[in-house]
Image (spheres, rainbow, N blue to C red):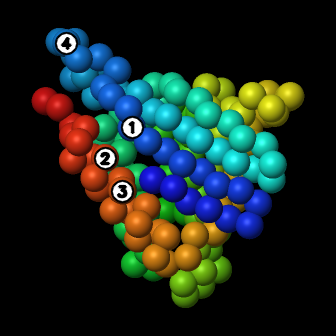
Amino acid sequence: MKLTGPEGSFELNILDYECTDSPYFMDRNWLIVSVRTRYQELDYVRTASILSTWELELLLKWMRAIADEHELSSRLTFVDPALSFSNTSTGRNDYRLRVKLSADALPNWKRDRTPFYLPVAPDKPELQRAIQDLERQLRQFPVRD
């Protein structure tokens, strides 16, 4: 999934399940995620286990609701606070999101350890492509019983 804006971009890709043979439901559903950001001229790539399969489902539903202009919530947070999303859109076909990166997802060029908020402003076609990509990734890494 890729989202861009005037100051940079955010990309999220699922690489694999973290645990393949755990007897515990929670452990079997943690994902290894690649986060790639660009802010102004600063690039950053990080791989970490910061999302679960069911949280990927929540992100997909949240983004679909924004695209349909039926916001479920202005913020979406996860169990691991390293990543979260906020909707700051102002109206029809004006999509403005903030991606909060902290802890394991904090860019290495950020010298203090406070969270970094990356603004992105995808247009409708880009938002739809991001949703389709999330759908594809969720089919590849579904929730496991």
Say which label, 1 or 3, has the lower sequence index: 1
Disc number placed over residue 133 in the picture, else none: 3
Q: Earlier in the sequence, mark 1 or mark 2?
A: 1
Q: Where residue 118 appears, x then y in whole percent?
A: 70, 52
Whole-Å distance between the Cαs marked 2 and 3?
A: 6 Å
Q: Which amino acid does the dot numbered 4 rest on?
A: Asp
Specify whether 72 is left or right of 30. Answer: right
Which residue lies at the image location 74% right of the left edge and 67% below the top edge? 6
Gap between marks 3 and 4, in whole Å? 27 Å
Read off the residue under disc 2: 137
Q: Are marks 1 and 4 in contact (CB under 8 Å)?
A: no
Q: Which residue is mark 1?
A: 14
**Would residue 66 be seen by someone viewing this image from the given angle?**
no
Judged by depth in the image, the label closer to the viewer, 1 or 4, is: 1
- Helix, strand or loop for disc 3: helix
Label 2 packing within 10 angstroms: few (<14), some (14-19), many (20+): some
Name the kind of residue labelled 2 in the image.
Gln
